[in-house]
Amino acid sequence: MKPTFLRLTLGSLLICLTAAPSGFAATSKPGTVAWRGWTDTVFADARREKRLVILDLEAIWCHWCHVMDETTYADPEVAAILGKGYIAVKVDQDSRPDMSNRYEDYGWPATILFDSHGQELAKLSGYIPKERMRVLLQAFIDDPTPGPSVISERKRVIAMGPSALAPSTRAELIKDHTDNYDVKYGSWGTVQKFLASDPMEYTMELAGTGDVKAHQMAIQTLDGQLSLIDPVWGGVYQYSHGGVWTNPHFEKIMSVQSTNLRIYALAFAQFQDLKYRTAAVSVRRYLKTFLTSPQGAFFTSQDADQKQGEHAGEYFALNDAGRRRGGMPRIDTNIYARENGWAIEALAAAGGLLGEKEWVDEAVRAADWIIQNRSLPGGGFRHGGLAPSATVPGPYLGDTLAMSRAFLQLYATTADRVWLKRAEESAKFIATNFASPTGKPGFVTVKARTGAALTPLPQRDENIQMARFANLLSHYTGNKEYRTWADKAMTFLSAPEVAERRPAAGVLLVDRELTSDPTHITIVGSKTDPEAQRLFASARQFAGTYMRIEFWDNAAEGPMPNPDVTYPQLKRAAAFACASGRCSAPIYDAPKIAEVVNRFQKAE
């Protein structure tokens, strides 16, 4: 009888959460497993050699991935079984967003077994001891049919949903968002503790409308997350396990740094608590010191382990000198467009919110490097240094989408129309290359190509980001076609099997934004006028994410990109705020911008 292997959820203590690269990451000791990289021929090779396929999807910063290499895959018996019956494939998930997105629910390491035709036989999450691995591998050699971890899952067939949530679905998601909150310690879920971007953003928006309970949830989570900031080097550890904030996993990955930088800058703008500003400064200091390349672009991550496979708690308890004497945990010096897009967007947003021009300059410098070194014809971006080809996978939606969002944020922060133009070019590349075929929902994670080993699929987080980006871009430009792209993403997100997945907040954010207009602040005046510049700086510091912020210098630049509001030409610079169906009179005093918008929003 084939043994039952339970699928572990994101609550497992053994999962290394989140995002990451492509290709072959050979971290095992020589002479054990004959690893190869993932290619489109893997299943044809397996059929010819009469073997199964095992995929070890790892993160090169992940502690338990290192432990599995040092123990399980170093075991001679495991290696012998793999050598006899399997093609063994190892992939660093940061380098392959398509693989990462497909199996993200399983955490890292994820272990996937296939038959020679590409049918999944087993999907397993987290560290697998060598004894269990021997039994698992032999069981599928003896009986190569799908096991419980595959059979028990719902079929991955997602129907077209509506382009907006039904009221009953919306109510259910709101309830789930509240019910999944840990009232004792803060954050959503009770096993891992970390600052989740969409739940925090949604909760802070509710708090901004005067929701007292949401205010309490936001503050409790923000304060708890401060425990995961490295007091020595700055930056944020990935998460804490055991249901408390005091058991960190020490990897520092770009998705976590960018989320915390942006959210803490927003938190300071909204709650005016200096410790949140200090947190944002700490994250930016870490990015500048450890993850910035000499060219100004950003590296990908820093390892959890100073010595691979050994817990690093004692190491990270040391001061700076003590850590450096022992040697630094490895930094992944790959420069990916996706991770840079995350960092650029966060730095530009935080720089505007906190009035830090140097941060915005760093975002622009990184954007310029990525444009020069990662661009594809037509407005897209490749993941790493090699252009997509018959042997190099891609392009991936995540790279162009992250850069698109970064460009739109740079436009909001700098008012330089070149960034808006780039955002539009990248949006069109996405629509051309990643839209699911007519009649199917959403946008797929990798461009489809003939002979691919696995069929491209849409992924939830990417479609949330795409819907929000395309919708906001439509407001900035007045181009209604962009809104249709947002609706296409929503047809994927609103399908029950997608919408009902946790966390609920991302879909709720999309739903809110597709059914309302963004808060719109426009500065009317010359961009060389110090008074107009002060008004624009004040507008940038308003706490909110669903924002349309513009600086209109009619004499120098002509009409606005979307002239949907008629503004008077006054003798002095003025700000105009529109929110909740009403617009203000001219505002000449910079601090009054936030006062007017807050009054409009709380009157909803």
Image (cartoon, helix red, strand yellow):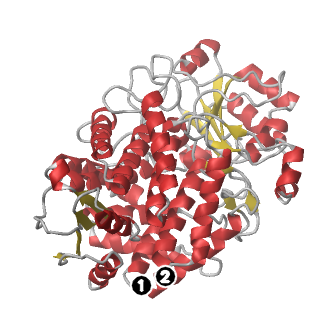
- As drawn, is 180 to the left or to the right of 32? left
Residue linked to disc 2:
215
Amino acid at pointer 1: Asp
- As drawn, is 526 to the left or to the right of 241? left
What SS does tag 1 mark? loop
Q: Are marks 2 and 1 in contact (CB under 8 Å)?
A: yes
> How much space separates mark 2 and mark 1, taking CA atoms?
6 Å
On the image, the x and y values in percent for residue 99 come to: 54, 36
Report the residue at 48% width, 41% height from top: 365
Callout 1: few (<14), some (14-19), or many (20+) C-alpha neighbours within 10 Å?
A: some
Numbered label tally: 2
- Of residue 519 and residue 196, the one placed in the foreground of this image is 519
Amino acid at pointer 2: His
Residue linked to disc 1:
211
- Of residue 396 and residue 579, the one placed in the foreground of this image is 579
Report the residue at 44% width, 29% height from top: 372
Image quarter hosting the N terminus: top right
